[in-house]
Amino acid sequence: MDFKLTEEHIMIRDAARDFAKQELLPGVIERDEKQEFPKELIKKMGELGFLGMMASPEYGGGGMDTISYVLAMEELSKIDASASVMVSVNNSLVCWGLDTFGNEEQKKKYLSKLTTGEKLGAFCLSEPEAGSDATSQRTTAIDKGDHYILNGTKNWITNGSSADYYLVIAQTDKEKKHKGINAFIVEKDFEGFEIGPKEQKLGIRGSDTHSLNFNDVKVPKENRIGEDGFGFKFAMKTLSGGRIGIAAQALGIAAGAYELAKDYSKQRKAFGTEICNHQAIAFKLADMHTQIEAARHLVMKAAWDKDQGENYDLSGAMAKLHASKTAMDVTVEAVQVHGGNGYVKEYHVERLMRDAKITQIYEGTSEIQKIVISRSILKD
Ligand code: COS
């Protein structure tokens, strides 16, 4: 066993850390308040290679391993989880999905633009009545020979209005249940595609989340991903990797809040000494650090499994379950360590606490992760 990072990993982690401090930290409070994220920042992330880290170099990707990706995700998430969710969706769901299951034409036409930040992607599975119960897709894709006609609504879509290309899951043949589901690439300007209102959210407020409507949207057959009926497997396989990215995001939120709390405790004085000298605070920091280290090991193990070609459904689900709980626990404690200052925006920890909650919900709730974990351990 070797717990050491390679020099290349350290370089990537440090580059992400510098970018987050220099480019994401200024304005992070205002972006959260206004619920916006400037296009130029997305472009910059693309130019620096953060949007297509693991994708094949022949399509403009960085060709990096999953360890590099989670290291970058952790660093970006310490500062701005709204930026990191855009990075995560574009990398693990959209680029990875297309790189792994798309055909040559789809990769040339779409992937090569998504890896560089020229275009941004979104992943559209959830519906008003199909969140956790993902097989119950109501959006339909009727086969019309050389094209499909899409009708329906998708909900809570990250990058909802800022994306250019949307991977959309829809039901082609209801009789066949999940085996009758397909995945499609939909372009923003396809006729009948409509972006619904922006959600007003508790956290990750900089990232734009929308519902989407499909009204007789004509999608060419060449935009279907994989064989007919492959859509549900496509979604499940893609989400398995996505969960590692979200676990890394949760880890970063926790680590960011912990670092702020530790620094604060060394400066703030009460009862004649820095508050870190009080066991009440020191023990909180000890618990936070231990939980974060455990989460980091689970995240790294899941990333390593993926890089080694091992099955990562179980390790990814465990990483997400534990890291997202850690993000909640640690951010709540970080606010407590900051006392009254923790409750105001300029100290950042209240935002991290609000951002943490979504990691227990999206890309499979904690309860869904427990389904995946329990099924996996009980099948042997
Ligand atoms: N990789 C490949 N295939 C998978 C898979 C995975 N990780 N997980 C499930 N499948 C396949 C199964 O093998 C099965 O195919 P076969 O019938 O050919 O064997 C098919 O998918 C259906 O699986 P299953 O019967 O287990 O479906 P369930 O309805 O019981 O649901 C869960 C399984 C709960 C795990 C799934 O619905 C899920 O992950 N839901 C959460 C979705 C989600 O993350 N939503 C958030 C949206 S993104 S913000």
Image (spheres, rainbow, N blue to C red):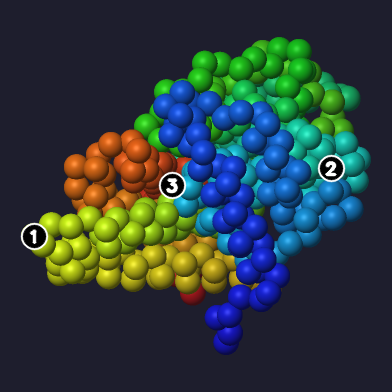
The residue type indicated by label 3 comes to: Thr
Residue 13 x %, y %: 61, 62
Q: Describe the element under mark 1 as helix, strand or loop.
A: loop
Q: Residue at x 59, y 21 (%)?
A: 212
Q: Up-down: is 247 above or below 198?
A: below
Q: Which mark is residue 112?
A: 2
C-alpha separation, residue under disc 3 versus residue under disc 2:
29 Å
Residue 344 x %, y %: 28, 36
Tell me which numbered mark, 3 or 2, is placed earlier along the sequence: 2
Q: Residue at x 24, y 43 (%)?
A: 341
Q: Nearer the viewer, residue 202 or 137?
A: 202
The residue type indicated by label 2 comes to: Ser
Quickly name the residue at label 1.
Answer: 271
Tell me which numbered mark, 3 or 1, is placed earlier along the sequence: 1
Q: Describe the element under mark 2 as helix, strand or loop.
A: helix
Quickly name the residue at label 3.
Answer: 359
Q: Nearer the viewer, residue 236 or 107?
A: 107
Number of residues whose C-alpha sits closer than 10 Å to that of mark 1, classed few (under 14), some (14–19) or many (20 or more): few
| 141 lies left or right of 36 | right
Q: Nearer the viewer, mark 3 or mark 1?
A: 1
